[in-house]
């Protein structure tokens, strides 16, 4: 798992490096790219009374391209999560997402969107065999963006998500999900996207 995490961090770093190099050679647009790091906490409860709630928390890395439609931003992104539980459970998720955000003149924004959450890896003290499935989540965000230099921004964001499908644990452990939600907070740097003119 550590190798996968290191590889994903390296991909984010390379993307930032290549984007910066291309920045000086191309035309700047109004679109904004954000790279964020965050903390996430999720709770999943099950319909069976004998099944304990599953609580996971950990780190989230997110890259998001925001199409600027003034005052609306359409964010298209992907997030990697590495979360752990008290019972030695370790889980990795990959989450493609789309978010519509309404911006105010002062930099405050609110929005909503959908997330596809795919389990990349699962490990627990029982060496459980887990089918890797995709769940559909809905989410709401609130955040604040402010400039720190020309074309460079700082972003702080809070997000709450709710599982709409409950596939993952039902398929893997034959227990139906009663509810599943998560709370996350992020901080990151954004920069104006570039256009190659092609």
Image (cartoon, rainbow, N blue to C red):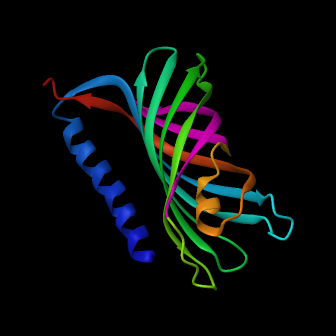
Specify the principal SS of the magenta part.
strand
Q: Position of residue 41 (x, y in %)?
A: 69, 57
In reply to whether residue 112 is colored magenta, the answer given is: no
Q: Residue at x 43, y 68 (%)?
A: 5
Q: Residue at x 52, y 15 (%)?
A: 71
Q: Quadrant of residue 56?
A: bottom right
Vertical relation: 185 (above or below) 43 = above
In reply to whether residue 144 is colored magenta, the answer given is: yes
Q: Quadrant of residue 137?
A: top right
Q: Position of residue 3 (x, y in %)?
A: 39, 75
Relative to 48, is 34 on the left or the right?
left
Relative to 25, is 71 on the left or the right?
right
Taking depth in this image into account, of 10 and 88 the one nearest to the observer is: 88
Q: Residue at x 72, y 57 (%)?
A: 176
Magenta residues, start to end = 132-161
Q: In the displayed orientation, state which residue is furthest to the right.
A: 49
Q: Residue at x 27, y 43 (%)?
A: 20
Q: Position of residue 168 (x, y in %)?
A: 59, 58
């Amino acid at each position: 798992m550590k190798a996968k995490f290191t590889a994903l961090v390296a991909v984010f770093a390379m993307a930032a490096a290549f984007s910066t190099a291309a920045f000086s050679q191309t035309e700047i647009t109004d679109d904004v790219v954000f790279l964020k790091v965050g903390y996430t906490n999720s709770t999943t409860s099950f319909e069976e009374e004998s099944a304990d709630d599953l609580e996971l928390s950990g780190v989230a890395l997110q890259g998001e391209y925001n199409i600027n439609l003034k005052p609306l931003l359409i964010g298209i992104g992907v997030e990697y999560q590495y979360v752990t539980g008290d019972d030695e459970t370790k889980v990795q998720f990959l989450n493609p997402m789309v978010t519509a955000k309404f911006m105010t003149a002062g930099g405050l924004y609110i929005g909503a969107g959908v997330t596809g959450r795919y389990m990349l890896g699962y490990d627990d003290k029982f060496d459980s065999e887990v089918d890797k499935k995709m769940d559909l989540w809905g989410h709401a965000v609130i955040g604040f963006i402010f400039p720190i230099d020309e074309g460079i921004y700082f972003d702080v964001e809070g997000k709450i998500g709710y599982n709409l499908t409950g596939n993952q644990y039902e398929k893997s452990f034959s227990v139906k999900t009663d509810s599943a939600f998560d709370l996350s907070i992020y901080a990151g740097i954004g920069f104006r996207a570039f256009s190659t003119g092609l």
